Amino acid sequence: MYINPDKCVACGNCTYVCPMGAIYVDPATKRSTIDRDECVECFSCYNGLSQEHLNPTLVRGMRKIFSMMRLRFDPEPDVCPTAAFEPDKLEWPRVVRRAFSDPRVPHESTGIEGRGTEEVKTNDISGRVKVGEVGFTIEFGRPGLGTRFYEIEKMSMALAKIGVDFEKKNPVTTLMTDTKTGKIREDILNEKVLSAILEIKVAVSRVEEIINVVHQVEKQVDTVVVLGVGVKCDENGDENVVRPVLERLGYNIERAKTNAGLGRITNKEVAAK
Ligand code: SF4
Ligand code: SF4
């Protein structure tokens, strides 16, 4: 994203809409500026503010005159008064930032918006996780923090080392050069995104092992890491296989989401049963 300095009148409205705190009013130039290294190309500034097309010279002049009278001339808080935002034409590898950070842009690899994966939220129709298996989602980053792929790679390589299968319909998996080692493409390692998710699936017997590895590596990762666990319920809607393991490890179990199984089954293998 780029702010045209010829148009910006330094009203500061955009500094409040950036989830990464990447926009600041530069006191030297008296213009808003974007820290490109921190910007995750989420387009919240461009899409979140209404654009007015006032003449920048006129607005600056009015602001100056008003300030001399100890008054302020400020636009409405949800407006960029001079339409100063100009999206860059994003090229590889920077385009990866937008793919993971702008929820309205579908991932090329999966066709899904946001982080590009349905995780196990649609397991009732996709049948990703079967009886006796556990699906883990390991989520990196949040608004205000974000994450870089070299942080995610620390986890993917540690998990690959103990022999896990990465979910194929996941955009981070498609960015690995080798799913056997968990190595992520060298040219995107420093790219920053709002958040991204690794997904793996293992046998129930490996739950404790996975949690231990995630717990160890998470300490070396410079962002928030959230671990999600997805399992199939039994015919009574209960889950008594993974729950005891998690409870033994000291977790207080709360169900985040339950799929009722009312959707059209998309997994041919599952539909045939
Ligand atoms: S909202 Fe527009 S005019 Fe105001 S500081 Fe931001 S870019 Fe500049
Ligand atoms: S594109 Fe997103 S991260 Fe970049 S400056 Fe705009 S709001 Fe901030």
Image (cartoon, rainbow, N blue to C red):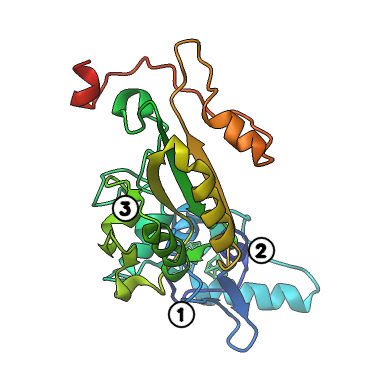
In the image, residue 98 above or below residue 265:
below
Residue 126 visible in this rendered orientation of the protein = yes
- In the image, which disc is placed on residue 74? 2
Q: Secondary structure at mark 3?
A: helix
Direction bottom: furthest residue: 28
- In the image, which disc is placed on residue 171? 3
In the image, residue 91 above or below residue 50:
below
The earlier-in-sequence mark between 1 and 3 is 1
Marks 2 and 3: which is nearer the front? 3
Question: Is the residue marked by circle 2 packed among few (<14), some (14-19), or many (20+) residues within 10 Å?
Answer: some
Direction front: furthest residue: 205
In the image, residue 15 above or below residue 6:
above
Tell me the kind of residue under disc 2. Answer: Asp
Q: Is residue 70 left or right of residue 173?
A: right
Q: Secondary structure at mark 2?
A: loop
Quick one: quadrant of the C terminus? top left
Nearest the viewer among 115 and 157 is 157
